[in-house]
Image (tube, rainbow, N blue to C red):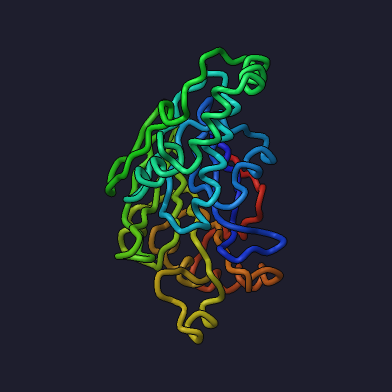
Amino acid sequence: MATLHILGTGTPTPTPERFGSAYAVNVGETVLMFDCGPAATHKLVKAGLWPTDVDHLFFTHHHFDHDADYPCFLLTRWDQSTGVEDDLHVHGPKLTEKLTRDLIGPDGAFAHDYRARIEHPGSQRVHVLRGGTLPRIPPYERVHARDYEPGEIARGDGWRVTAAPAVHAEPWLLSLAYRLDVNGKSIVFTGDTEPCDAVTELAQGADLMLCMCWGLEEKLIADGETHGVCGTRGAASMAQAAGVERLMLVHTGAALDGHEEEAVDDAGKAYEGEIIFASELDQLEL
């Protein structure tokens, strides 16, 4: 059994309904997180999870709507830890290691914060009352970040994550799509991509594909916005070609707020399976 939590299903444009991208999956005692867009840590808690529950974080790419909450997540996970939690493993394309080092390394942007919490007597007392022990160690000693190429990324008890190259903002940023296989079920996170063979192949026969949907296809074509993104029919065509059981529209553009049924109807012209228009804090059992 696995539970998918939709934390963020928006874009760089905030709306009252959605902002940025982030997802979490319960796999037994393990929580896997995919992307960490704006307010992802707060939404994680709203979903009934806790930052220290997350053992693996996978980045599709490093646009801010996918990683802006990363420093908040790293510091919150470290601050709320008692020292008995598993280390955090962070996986992603090029820049994942650099970003982590720049944020929480010995000379990182937030070193002043964790040094004060390590050394201040009041902060030490709060840590002990929370169940921690002294001395506290800096967060970078418990976070292992690595840049990955496509292929198998990580595996655990009953689960495996593999990646394929997506087509979005290259060559400035590299992008990955991920497939999570867990206990005979499979979820594909396309990240941001235009329809492409590599992601379609990754998604073959998946139970669920979460695909970005920037807008209605005809509007994207008219506006010249099809490069590097999927619209309604682009998402649907990949899902149909891959033979996935269900398609979930995520990373939906602001123009689709209030037009959810229209988006599902348009995608249905190119895909025969079930289509779900995701909302933040939705949960889905697999």
Q: Is residue 85 visible?
A: yes
Looking at the image, the residue that sits furthest to the bottom is 222
All told, the count of numbered labels is 0
Is residue 263 or residue 228 the one in the foreground?
228
Task: Give the quadrant of the N terminus.
Answer: top right
Q: Is residue 246 left or right of residue 107?
A: right
Residue at (55, 61) in percent of width and height: 251
Could you say where residue 114 lies in the image, as x and y percent from the top left? 53, 31
Task: Give the quadrant of the C terminus.
Answer: top right
Q: Is residue 1 visible?
A: no
Q: Quadrant of residue 46?
A: top right
Could you say where residue 130 lies in the image, as x and y percent from the top left? 66, 18
Could you say where residue 284 lies in the image, as x and y percent from the top left? 61, 44
Q: Decide: is 236 above or below 2.
A: below
Residue at (33, 40) in percent of width and height: 146
Q: Decide: is 69 above or below 18.
A: above
Could you say where residue 280 lies in the image, as x and y percent from the top left? 65, 52
Q: Quadrant of residue 107?
A: top left
Q: Decide: is 11 above or below 160.
A: below
Q: Is residue 54 left or right of residue 282?
A: left
Is residue 19 or residue 255 the one in the foreground?
19
Q: Quadrant of residue 262?
A: bottom right
Is residue 275 or residue 167 the one in the foreground?
167
Residue at (39, 53) in percent of width and height: 177
Residue at (30, 65) in percent of width and height: 171
Is residue 113 or residue 196 the one in the foreground?
113
